[in-house]
Image: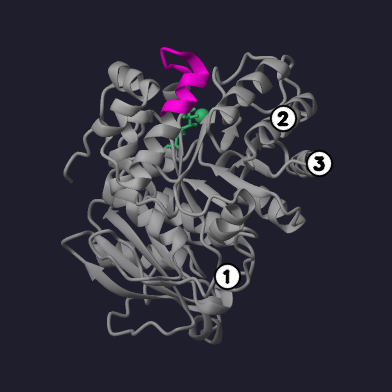
Amino acid sequence: MPRLAAYTGFLDLGYRPTEADVLVEYYVEPAPGLSLADAAQRIAAESSIGTWTDIATLKPSIAKRLAPHVYDINRKTWCVNIAYPAELFEPGNIPQILSSIAGNVFGMRDVANLRLEDFHLPMKLMKSFPGPALGIPGIRKMTGVRKRPLCGTIVKPKLGLSEREHADVAYKAWVNGLDLVKDDENLTSMAFNKFEARVLEVLDAKERAEQETGEKKIAVINVTAEATEMLRRAEFIKEHGGNCAMVDILTAGFSGVQALRKADLGLILHGHRAMHAALTRNRRHGIAMLPLAKFARLAGIDQLHVGAIVGKMEGGAKEVWNIGEEIEASVIAADKPGHRLAENWHGMKPVFAVASGGLHPGAVEPLVKAMGTESIIIQAGGGVHGHPGGTEAGARALRQAVDAAAEGIPLKQAMKKHKELAQAIEKWGAVRLKEE
Ligand code: CAP
Ligand code: MG
């Protein structure tokens, strides 16, 4: 393939970004024979107004108004920063922003590898998104759980139970101390577990559990499907007294998430991130979880899976903590080594960080040490239903571990008081947080 004509004229290292710019940080490995500056300019062009050759139709006035600026190149970290005029992006439209800064650029022959590390939006664009309807304050108000982490389970096996069996597992988890019970990411409406029947069974179980415990419970029911069907399913949950809809934000797509939020049903929107690792796992190519989490907050997700640090999925303490702070705080300081750009959320509601994936009661203490107690939801599927005493004992053990961690009671001491917790630690051990 002949070397394509250069995309030039976007290098502007003296440029100082303005408050009106969209900023993006990329990790870039140029194709052989290209410098980092060459590759950065081609990325800037292809993600904005340029293409592989000069064109007669690109009037100087357009370039003047809309050309981006490559304003920082770091040859030690292979990162480049690009400032884009905000006019290049449609207010309120996540797909269009992704098609610009996370679209063609990944396939360019001019880059050997490329990773979108973070982006920053100016206030006008930030405010064009609704953000969470409830967020942490709304969910804490709804449940009455003021301080400690919320805790929950995922009904397991992922698939296979009937609607009634599924609801029975949910009931057992709720009456034994858990706040939330969640469908698994691949449970939608199956021949053996139809969506509507599951909603009715689970909400009946929730009502009985609430009466029995005097506690407000959350039923996280998965609506993931084609967009109009997702809306219909979310409305069905609402009509039958449900309080939460779960959506697999990447497989359903941000367009679907935005449509669910636009329906404004007053439901908690639980964002599962299944498929994220196809984009986030390779540190040299793809999209980091941080920008995906930012899009989830902008789109209106109230609680978002961010990683569990000590669970079965990859994602270390620093990265998960950075993401947790990004979706919760209102003003974010830049964290250069962490590729995190400064951000101002202009009062957009904070999102609960959901820690899940390979967790069990023995993992709670280090997780709370790393993530605090105010803004996390701790979920365990296998770590509840795999307890030697079954779901009931597993739920009790998880809640015992969360209560102890929230009160600063050492696990060893809590184990002496709670047999279910001691049994869980006997089976799975106590997890140590690895130093990063
Ligand atoms: C956890 C889980 C969640 C993972 C997703 C699962 O089950 O239900 O989908 O938490 O990972 O299917 O693995 P276990 P993440 O508790 O039995 O592991 O939260 O990192 O997106
Ligand atoms: Mg799952």
Q: Which residues are magenta?
A: 385-397
Q: Is residue 165 above or below residue 229?
A: above
Q: Nearer the viewer, residue 387 or 297?
A: 387
Q: Name the quadrant containing residue 110.
A: bottom left
Percent x, y of residue 422: 32, 22
- The residue to which callout 1 is attached is 89
Q: Amino acid at mark 3?
A: Arg
- Mark number for residue 208? 2
Badge 1: few (under 14), some or many (20 or more) residues near its Cα, within 10 Å? many
Q: Residue at x 45, y 46 (%)?
A: 149
Secondary structure of residue under mark 1 = loop
Mark 1 vs 2: CB contact within 8 A: no
Tell me which secondary structure the magenta stretch mostly adopts. helix
Q: In this view, which residue lies farthest toward the right? A: 239
Q: Is residue 53 above or below residue 250?
A: below
**Closer to us: mark 3 or mark 2?**
2
169 lies left or right of 101: right
Q: Is residue 432 visible?
A: yes
Percent x, y of residue 255: 66, 52
Q: In this view, which residue lies farthest toward the front? A: 417
Q: Residue at x 48, y 68 (%)?
A: 50
**Closer to us: mark 3 or mark 1?**
3
220 lies left or right of 3: right
Q: Residue at x 51, y 56 (%)?
A: 351
Badge 3: few (under 14), some or many (20 or more) residues near its Cα, within 10 Å? some
- The residue to which callout 3 is attached is 232
Mark 3 vs 2: CB contact within 8 A: no
Q: Amino acid at mark 2?
A: Arg
Q: Nearer the viewer, residue 110 or 390?
A: 390
**Closer to us: mark 1 or mark 2?**
2
